[in-house]
Amino acid sequence: MTVYTSPVNGYRTQLQEGELSFPVSDLSASFSNDEIIVFATLEVPDTHTFALNHVWQDGPMNGNSLGMHDLSGSHLQSMGTLNLTSGQALASHGGDSNTVLKISHGVLNTVSWGIMMPLGFMAARYLKAVGPSTDPLWFYLHIALQLPGYIIGMAGGCNWPPPPPSTNLPASINLATWALGSYSFALDCFRYQDMHSIVVSALIFRPAKDHKYRYIWNRFHHGIGYTVLLLGFANIWIGFSILKPAMGWVIAYGVIFGAIVLSSVVLEVWKKLTRDGKTDAAQEVTIFVNEAGENTA
């Protein structure tokens, strides 16, 4: 095992051996129980420095050269402060601004596009199928879920963390999540302008039920809504592959996602059977009335 010092003056460093800005001696290391411990004596300049901020990383080997470490998960939290007086070390977890942005971006957009928007969709599609008794309850519930979801999604988009200067993720993955997020957000902005953005737009742009353009508006609204729903789900799972959060978060949303999909399938079957049953019943009544009229005549 080789231990040496290397000055890091910028990104894409090759970690060539060299002296640091302060003397380091007695370098050695040990490997035991899948842990590497590095020993060194640091000579700190006499500038009343009592704390030392430091980071640590691990990465792959490319031949005899050190490769770039990962840029996600625990690699974004490997930092700490060493008290030179007491000898105590305090690890920091996610304290940098980029990490905070990434966490808030992921949480807000998962709640928005992955939970509230789908629930709003389900409220409109399946409550409306119950019958006239749920009108306008389904509409208000649809707005109550999707309008806050839209606002939360805007907040999540506004704190989109800047990309790192270099990354070991495939460019296609970064481009995909950027494109899906931008397209979903743009579509939903357009969609909500024709629906209920700040409520006032609903009164201006949403045609009345008996308006000749209402059918076109419904197709437009539903088509964009389905597209946003699918892109939102795709973007969330691609985001998980980039941020690599703790497995508990992925499992938790996986359970929610599975419940939404399963409920939608069950309700869709129920809706189809209910609608077909009503249609058959209506046809039977029509046939009965026609036959009765013919017999009377």
Image (cartoon, helix red, strand yellow):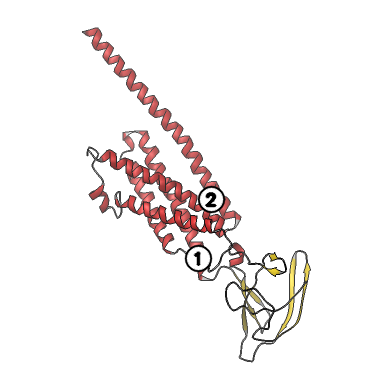
Sequence-earlier tag: 2 or 1: 1
Give coordinates of residue 54: x percent, y percent: 62, 76
Which residue type carries mark 2?
A: Tyr
Which residue type carries mark 1?
A: Pro
Give coordinates of residue 37: x percent, y percent: 74, 72
Residue 236 to residue 261: above or below: below
Residue linked to disc 1: 163
Structural distance between the alpha carbons of marks 2 and 1: 24 Å
Residue 86 to residue 167: above or below: below
Left/right of residue 209 with respect to residue 138 in the rendered view = left
Mark yes or no: residue 148 visible: no
Question: Residue at position x 45%, y 55% from top?
Answer: 179
Q: Nearer the viewer, mark 2 or mark 1?
A: 1
Question: Residue at position x 35%, y 41% from top?
Answer: 138
Left/right of residue 209 with respect to residue 272 in the rendered view = left
Quadrant (top left/top right/bottom left/bottom right) for the N terminus: bottom right
Mark yes or no: residue 93 visible: yes
Residue linked to disc 2: 253
Give coordinates of residue 44: x percent, y percent: 66, 87
- Mark 1 is surrounded, within 10 Å at the Cα level, by few (under 14), some (14 to 19) or many (20 or more) other residues, namely few
Left/right of residue 268 with respect to residue 247 in the rendered view = left
